[in-house]
Image: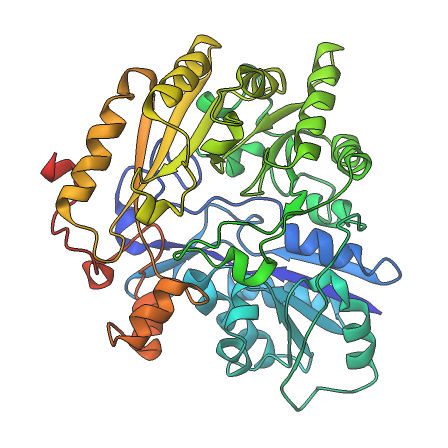
Amino acid sequence: MKILFIQPHKTVLTEDLHRNYSPFLAGTTDKFARVVPSLPAMTVLGALPDYENYFIDATAEDPYHFFPYNRNIHLIGMSDAQILDRVSKIKPNIVLMTSMFTSEYFAVNRIIRLIKSNFKIPIVVGGHHATLRPNWHLEAGANLIALGEGESNIEEIVNWLNRGNGRNIQIQRNQEVLDSLDRNWDIETVLKKPDGTARYPLSIVTRNPQIYFPENTNLSENAGVIYASRGCPHDCEYCNATARDGKKIRHMSLEKMIALTEKFISLGANTFYNESDTFGIHPTDREYLKWVSEQRANGRNINLANTNSFFAAYFFQNERFLPERVDLLRDAGFRTITVSIESFNEQYNRGKLRGITIPLLRDCFSYIRQQGLNLDVYMMYLFPEQTEEELKGDMRDIDLLSEYTNEVTWRSLMYFPGTIYYDWAIGTGRFSESEYRKLIEEGISFYHVSERFNFSKIKNPPRLIK
């Protein structure tokens, strides 16, 4: 029985194609989405070890090809003809797809319709967005939505479909929350193209290797990933991670983290991206950092990079800065540390900075730079009802730390289904779900936020009101 997992296209605004950016090496900009080894595919296909597994990443396999979705958006990657040719040659019994990001849900639906128009193959869609808004994909022709964590009962779903169920009906299957993340990953199917070459060379995975990687890094080698925990205790109004994964941080064992790392290395991947938003908070993460540090001290080529940000709380305990936490990152190969502040205002940051003062942050940031590490600080604005004075207060506070930062990244807030802010906006008539979906298909996203979604009292971006 043949199972084909398809990772859909990444998107880019058409207007950005006319600017001086290269697709995934966009310097300090975030104009292009970053392609990474498909975690959904590795975990879900890993739960199907007795099947003949195949994988297509529509972007990673042709990352410098662009074609229009509409007048505002281009898709990055394989053409329709290329995808249909691959599907025709594989002849899968079932197609699995992931819909992780609301801002790219239409790219998922496009492939659903493409396959349904040319083949009679049942399609199962899972992922973060699909769990929160399953009907958005059922209406495009998906046969079944796998809610929650896909690997928990994907084998049951596949067997059920293979018996002829669900071919002409739309159905959803609830899934149990995993207590243990020590599950099998199918790394080889995802990391290697059919011809044996790297599907995810570092050259297309990082935006700026000069910042993130050690000197002489081989950019043609595969990238590896770490994703050892799920869940977030903060349940922020603008984030839907807690809505799907819960408040409890569930973690895989240190032994499993090491085993997965060794498997990646055996396939030529020596540089690893952390993809967990809470990395470092759980003690097992710190044990893993110690293991990586020991391997590097013994001459092994292992490097970690964190393109996600660290919660500031990682560096502190009981209102005390812990320099050894920075040492762990330095010794594990990090070159750049991104610290998430978001806002100094507790009304907006959910108390994530409680007990962490400007002097404590100064001690931390100063020490990070003393260790020869780059430092980026992540800030947010355009919270609902946020005033210009509140934003200026955040800007004044971050200016007190500016001598230690390489960069301060300001990100405007976006509204996503499954969040408190989204429900507030729908409930108060700021927009309807149909209006929201229309704007998403016009290119509004986390990276390209329109004034249409500004429900704060701020009328100008930070650079104009400073």
Q: Quadrant of the N terminus?
A: bottom right
Residue 446 point in image, percent of width and height: 36, 53
- The scheme the figure's colours follow is rainbow
Say if residue 208 shows up in the picture. no
Query: Horizontally, is 307 left or right of 158 in the view?
Result: left
Depth check, front residue: 45 or 388: 388
Query: For this view, does 268 lie left or right of residue 126?
Result: right
Pinpoint residue 406: horizontal percent, then vertical percent. Answer: 34, 21
Which percent across, then down, holds residue 280?
59, 33
Seen from this angle, which residue lies furthest bottom? 168
Evaluate whether residue 185 shows in this view.
Answer: yes
Q: Residue furthest top?
A: 370
Q: Position of residue 13 (x, y in %)?
A: 32, 54
Left or right side of 113 for 445: left
Indicate the quadrant where residue 375 lies: top left
Residue for point 15% across, 36% down = 463
Count of all numbered marks drawn on residues in the image: 0
For the residue pair 33 and 445, the one nearer the viewer reads as: 445
Q: Which residue corresponds to the image point at 74% horizontal and 33% vertical from the top-left?
A: 261
Residue at far right of view: 50
Q: Nearer the viewer, residue 71 or 227?
A: 227
Q: Compared with residue 447, is residue 254 higher up or lower down, i.e. above or below?
A: above
**Vertical placement of 42 versus 123: above or below?**
above
